[in-house]
Image: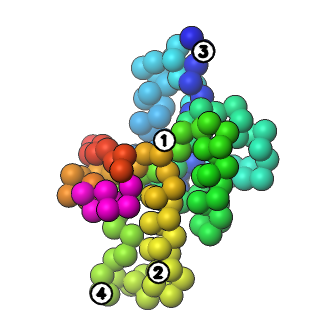
Amino acid sequence: MSKINVLVLPSDKSGVGKFRSVDPHVKLQNLYPEDFHVDIDYEPRLNDINYWKKYQIVHFHRSFGNIDQCPQIIKTLQNLGIIVIVDIDDYWLPGMEHPLHDLIVTHKIHEKIIANLKAADIVTTTTSIFANEIKKFAKNVFVIPNG
């Protein structure tokens, strides 16, 4: 059996990117070096089809690249036979008291995040309560609690 190549697209280099994207995948590769090879890329070559073809799984947090193009890129990856996993740890539309609420609504970011959830093969999240909310849009939802 050949290794499963996993591409991880962290949202940042600390916080969520580190703890929900980078660290778990480094651990996966370290625990199962014969089974998995993990690449971590903060600036994927979005328009280079050959770049993507070497992976069997692509994992990202919430979105990657241009958020407007993300669902189409996900579909392209799926057409190549790549499993796409999105991780999300926070609700996509914070309350009106949140400082980013108006910006999110104005730019329809919450709708774009939901589009990513719908497009992905698998969604991972932090709690069963949040998983139940995500299941309104995605069927394959799994809980991976924060450490």
Q: Is residue 27 above or below residue 144?
A: above
Assess disc 1: are there few (<14), some (14-19) or many (≥20) residues with their C-alpha within 10 Å of its C-alpha.
many
Q: Give the quadrant of residue 81.
A: top right
Q: Give the quadrant of residue 144.
A: top left
- Determine the secondary structure under disc 1: helix
Residue tagged by mark 3? 2
Check disc 2 and give the amino acid type.
Answer: Ile
In the rendered image, the quadrant that contains the N terminus is top right
Q: Earlier in the sequence, mark 1 or mark 2?
A: 1
Mark 1–mark 4 distance (CA, rounded to whole Å)? 31 Å
Check disc 1 and give the amino acid type.
Answer: Val
Q: Residue at x 60, y 28 (%)?
A: 5
Q: Residue at x 62, y 52 (%)?
A: 75
Residue tagged by mark 4? 97
Q: Earlier in the sequence, mark 4 or mark 2?
A: 4
Mark 3–mark 4 distance (CA, rounded to whole Å)? 50 Å
Check disc 3 and give the amino acid type.
Answer: Ser
Q: Give the quadrant of residue 83.
A: top right
Query: In the rendered structure, which segment of residues is drawn in magenta?
Result: 132-138
Residue 83 part of the magenta-drawn span: no
Q: Give residue 22's mark.
A: 1
Mark 1–mark 3 distance (CA, rounded to whole Å)? 22 Å
Indicate left or right for 131 with 75 as reference. left
Q: Are marks 3 and 4 in contact (CB under 8 Å)?
A: no
- Determine the secondary structure under disc 3: loop
Q: Are marks 4 and 2 in contact (CB under 8 Å)?
A: no
Q: Earlier in the sequence, mark 2 or mark 3?
A: 3
Indicate left or right for 8 with 128 as reference. right
Q: Are marks 1 and 4 in contact (CB under 8 Å)?
A: no
Mark 4–mark 2 distance (CA, rounded to whole Å)? 12 Å
